[in-house]
Image: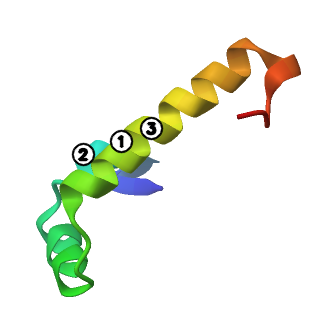
Amino acid sequence: MCAIRGRGWYPADFTELTLFQLLEDPVIRLLMSSDRVDPDELRALFTDLRARLTRDEMAPGEAGRT
C-alpha cells in the first residue's frame, strides 16, 4: 500500500495487528456481539490453539495424536 507524502508516493507504514488486538476493535466487538460471540471464550480458544500448535511443532512425530 502506498501513501502520498510531500510530492511522491511512498510505502505506507502499516503493521499487521494480532488477533488479540483485533478483538479489541470496536467494530469487531460490535459484530461479535451481534453474532453472540463471547470475546473471552474466543480468546481462550485462540490461546488453546496456539498451545496445541506450539506443542505439535516441538514434537513433529507426535502431530495429530491426542
Amino acid carrying mark 2 in the image: Gln
Residue bearing mark 2? 21
Q: Please provide percent x and percent y for residue 5.
A: 28, 49
Label 2: state its secondary structure.
helix
Amino acid carrying mark 1 in the image: Thr
> In the rendered view, how is the structure colored?
rainbow
Viewer-side residue, 9 vs 36: 36
Label 3: state its secondary structure.
helix
Instruction: Tell me the quadrant of the picture where the C terminus can be found.
Output: top right
Amino acid carrying mark 3 in the image: Asp
Viewer-side residue, 65 vs 7: 65
Give whichever of discs 1 and 3 has the lower sequence position: 1
Marks 2 and 3 close (CB-CB < 8 Å): no
Q: Is residue 57 left or right of residue 29?
A: right
Residue bearing mark 1? 18
Give whichever of discs 2 and 3 has the lower sequence position: 2
- Name the front one of labels 1 and 3: 3
Q: Quadrant of residue 41?
A: bottom left
The local crowd at label 1, few if under 14, some if 14 to 19, many if 20 or more residues have their Cα within 10 Å, is: few
Q: Quadrant of residue 52?
A: top right
C-alpha gap between disc 1 and disc 2? 5 Å
Residue bearing mark 3? 48
